[in-house]
Image: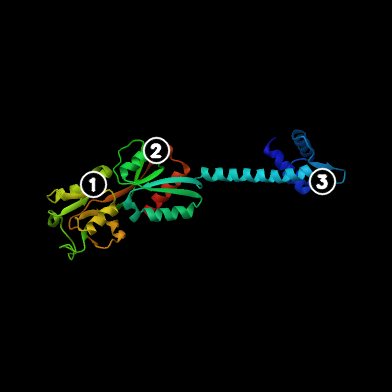
């Protein structure tokens, strides 16, 4: 039995007329009658009572009609789902992101993607850059928002956002009222920083910025997440140099000041496996790239 046999049967059952059913199906009447006979022989029971003047469903035929409609509906749903998945419009996308991306590019990208592709289920994981790279290697992530550089030939990496660095100070700090601060003025201050292994690109930018000002920062405390660093600044454990978008965190007890020196641009990049760009991943990449260019 093939699904076309079910379509033929449903057409005849709904029309109760072989001629009209044949017109509806765009086939000739004799082949249609033959197909219904073959279906009945294969099923082992009669579907229709036929006379020269009328066609009527048997009791078994009426039950078979209900089940046939259900099967055809499920087939149509399966076809539609397959088409949507093939176009990247349905399925699941597992996304990793560094914590600081939650204060700049991540929210607008997610809003736009959910609006454009509501049938795609999003699974989000806040992870450091090094953990995202491991999860991508383990195929636990589909795409990530990381801090470059990324040196892995198996990964596709594209910078989608850049921002300057600023100084995060406790609001009761000596320099809290200064409109702009020189790095040399804070050379002796205790610094809060993250371990280099978590985001070596951003770490090296911060250290190089300080070294160009003539000092190496005295790191008194390390923290993994940017929001934890800001919390420690609020607790007056030290000061920190952070991406400017961290101002969106709005933590009580912390103020942000521009630096007198020109700072490097902290970057956020989107990354995925080169050989595993599914239609859904490509949709996400295209949308993220388009949004951050505008």
- Could you tell me which quadrant the C terminus lies in? bottom left
Q: Which of marks 2 and 3 is nearer the N terminus?
A: 3
* Residue 41 left/right relative to 78: right
- Between marks 2 and 3 in the image, the one whose residue lies nearer the viewer: 3
Q: Do the residues labelled 3 and 1 touch (CB within 8 Å)?
A: no
Residue closest to the far bottom:
177
Q: Which residue is drawn at 67% across and 39% down?
A: 3
Dividing the picture into quarters, in which one does residue 74 lie?
Answer: top right
Question: Could you classify mark 3 by the number of other residues whose Cα lies within 10 Å: few (under 14), some (14-19), or many (20 or more)?
Answer: some
Label ID, residue 56: 3
Give coordinates of residue 66: x percent, y percent. 71, 46
* Residue 229 left/right relative to 33: left
The residue beneath circle 2 is 274
Helix, strand or loop at disc 3? strand
Task: Report the front residue among 24 and 259.
Answer: 259
The residue beneath circle 1 is 203
Q: Earlier in the sequence, mark 2 or mark 1?
A: 1
């Amino acid at each position: 039995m093939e699904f076309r046999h079910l379509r033929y049967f449903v057409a005849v059952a709904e029309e109760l007329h072989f001629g009209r059913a044949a017109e509806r199906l765009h086939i000739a009447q004799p082949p249609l009658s033959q197909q219904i006979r073959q279906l009945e022989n294969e099923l082992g029971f009669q579907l229709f009572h036929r006379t020269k003047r009328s066609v009527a469903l048997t009791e078994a035929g009426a039950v078979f009609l209900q089940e046939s409609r259900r099967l055809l509906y499920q087939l149509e749903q399966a076809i539609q789902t397959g088409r949507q998945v093939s176009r990247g419009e349905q399925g699941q996308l597992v996304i990793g992101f560094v914590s600081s991306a939650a204060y700049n590019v991540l929210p607008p990208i997610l809003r736009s993607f959910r609006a454009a592709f509501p049938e795609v289920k999003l699974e989000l994981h806040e992870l450091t850059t090094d953990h995202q790279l491991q999860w991508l290697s383990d195929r636990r992530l589909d795409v990530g928002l990381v801090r470059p550089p990324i040196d892995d030939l198996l990964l596709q990496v594209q910078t989608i956002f850049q921002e300057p660095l600023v100084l995060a100070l406790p609001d009761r700090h000596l320099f809290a009222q200064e409109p702009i601060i020189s790095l040399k003025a804070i050379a002796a201050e205790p610094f809060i920083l993250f371990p280099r292994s978590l985001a070596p690109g951003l770490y090296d930018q911060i250290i190089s910025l300080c070294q160009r000002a003539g000092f190496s920062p005295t790191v008194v405390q390390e923290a993994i997440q940017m929001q934890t660093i800001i919390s420690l600044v609020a607790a007056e454990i030290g000061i920190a140099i952070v991406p400017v978008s961290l101002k969106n965190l709005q933590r009580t007890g912390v103020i942000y000041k521009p630096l007198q020196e020109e700072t490097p641009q902290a970057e956020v990049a989107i990354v995925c496996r080169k050989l595993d760009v599914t239609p859904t991943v490509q949709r996400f990449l295209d949308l993220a790239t388009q949004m951050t260019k505008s």
